[in-house]
Amino acid sequence: MARNGQVQVGNKLMQRAIKEFGDEILERVREIVQETGMIIYNNAVATVAVDSGDTRQSITFYSSLDGLSCTVEVGSSIAIYLEFGTGIHAVNNDGRKTPWVYWSDKLNRWVFTRGMPAQPFWFPAVDKGRRYFSREIKKLG
């Protein structure tokens, strides 16, 4: 469901229900798709760690013209580091094992670090949207 910081909402159960019930169900499916996208968007925006606000501002929501699909994406290049952590704190122990130093313009000094713990916001938001979508689509039959 997630690829390159992007989520598209829709599935085969939905397509089957539309074929089976036609126009009667089409409007409810549109609502479910749009509500799911907004759940993902709102949860991601509400839970993302904020320093400068760039990552929060990079989260966007787009809807298709027919309302049967929507896209929520994160455009920030640091979102992956927030989601999975860095250095010795990285998820799955995939981070750099040695400490490093970098210059911080914000602090106006050199910073020694071993990394930062994960601060997940994206996949928890997607999971909430997925649960809502599945529950609502199942109600349709």
Image (tube, rainbow, N blue to C red):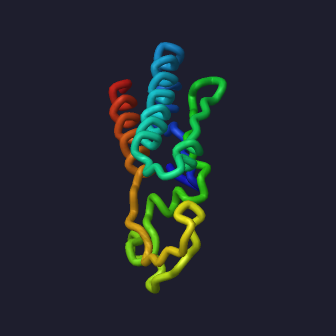
Q: Is residue 11 above or below residue 123?
A: above
Taking the view exactly as shown, the residue that stands out farthest to the right is 65
Relative horizontal placement of residue 65, taking residue 3 as reference (left or right):
right
Give the total of numbered labels.
0
Res 77 quadrant in image: bottom right
> 116 or 13: nearer the eye?
116
Q: Quadrant of the C terminus?
A: top left
Residue at position x 54%, y 75% in the image: 110
> 99 or 17: nearer the eye?
99
Res 97 quadrant in image: bottom left
Taking the view exactly as shown, the residue that stands out farthest to the front is 108
Relative horizontal placement of residue 95, taking residue 76 as reference (left or right):
left
Q: Is residue 37 above or below residue 48?
A: above
- Image coordinates for residue 92, horizontal then vertical, percent: 39, 73
Relative horizontal placement of residue 118, taking residue 8 as reference (left or right):
left
- Image coordinates for residue 115, horizontal then vertical, percent: 44, 73
Is residue 74 something that shows in the picture? yes
Residue at position x 42%, y 50% in the image: 121
